[in-house]
Amino acid sequence: MVEIFLTIGTAYILKKAGVFSQDNSRVLVNYVLYFALPLMSFKAAHGLGFSKEVFYVGLGAWKVILLSLFFSYIVGRLLKLDSGNLRSLMVTSSFGNTAFLGYPYSFSYYGEEGLRFAIIYDNVGSFLAISSIGFLIISGKLSLKSILLFPPFLGLILGFFLRGYQLPAFLERFIDFSVASLLPVILFSLGLSLDFSTLKKDRTLLVIAIVIKMLLSPLIALLVFKIYPLDPIAYKVSILQSGMPTMITASILLLKYGLNHNLAFASAGIGILLSFVLMPLWFFLLSV
């Protein structure tokens, strides 16, 4: 936990000191999305192949997301929210930060094997869900192109396709060298993107979003993933991934389409802080 906290905290302090700006996080995010993360996805898929764990982790992730969407929709209707706030609450409560925060936690607790399952949950579950049903909720239309051309997803597919081929030694070294930069850059970009200026707005919706996303969703996951014949680490990583705070990408999409992005960014920021308490708690409960 120390390396996660210190990396995020250092980046946030340096931003406040004027050494970096929040806009600098975009460069780091592009580095992750277009270089390091596709290589990590390729490595994970090439090492795992398409197995029952891949299928069940992806299927379970979809079930958790859909059930979270259902519960947040019911709550929103009971509160008689307008369409914009209802859709914002559903997205904020259901799509988690399974890459930028989920990868470091999974690696910290379960090592390289845990990270591989976290990537499967993120790519097959979270990414496909936000790119399809999530995008449909936010914008009212579906974008197949955004799914097929997303670099980490392409890396995943290529890794599965080349599963039976031995890579040249120099290429394996290049991938390992590049992937080593992934987690520190992810955490540093998160620290630069933290912004707590919107916390006074939509307090009720903020509490509801965090409770559903970080408490109810992992409880749902405990039941969903229990019925599948999963490796213990795959099971535990899936629970952790289900309890991650609001997805940064979802927050950006809400901003782009004129919905309640303040709710999303506040939920993501507070959720990161709460994760320093909740993730060790989930890790302890899953280890008992």
Image: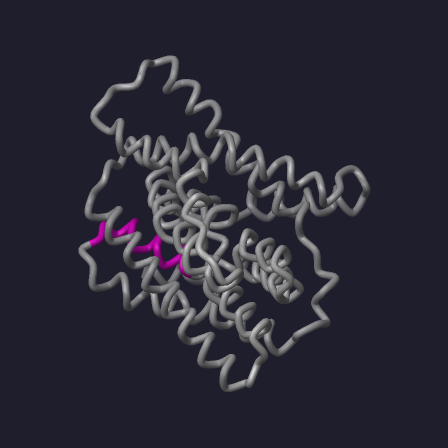
Give the residue at the far right of this rendering: 18
Of residues 12 and 121, the one drawn nearer to the viewer in this rendering? 121
Q: Residue at x 64, y 58 (%)?
A: 255
Check if residue 234 falls in the magenta segment.
Answer: yes
Q: Residue at x 53, y 60 (%)?
A: 139
Establish if 229 lies above or below 70.
above
Number of numbered callouts drawn: 0
Horizontal side of 54 relative to 213 (left or right) equals left
Establish if 190 lies above or below 92.
above
Of residues 165 and 117, the one drawn nearer to the viewer in this rendering? 165
Stretch of the chain drawn in magenta: 230-242
Return the x and y of residue 59 as percentages of the image width and height.
28, 56
Q: Residue at x 46, y 76 (%)?
A: 73
Q: Residue at x 81, y 41 (%)?
A: 18
Chief secondary structure of the magenta portion = helix
Return the x and y of residue 103 as percentages of the image width and height.
45, 45
Model colouring: one colour
- Looking at the rendering, in which quadrant would you find the C terminus? bottom left
Establish if 25 lies above or below 198.
above
Q: Quadrant of residue 222?
A: bottom left
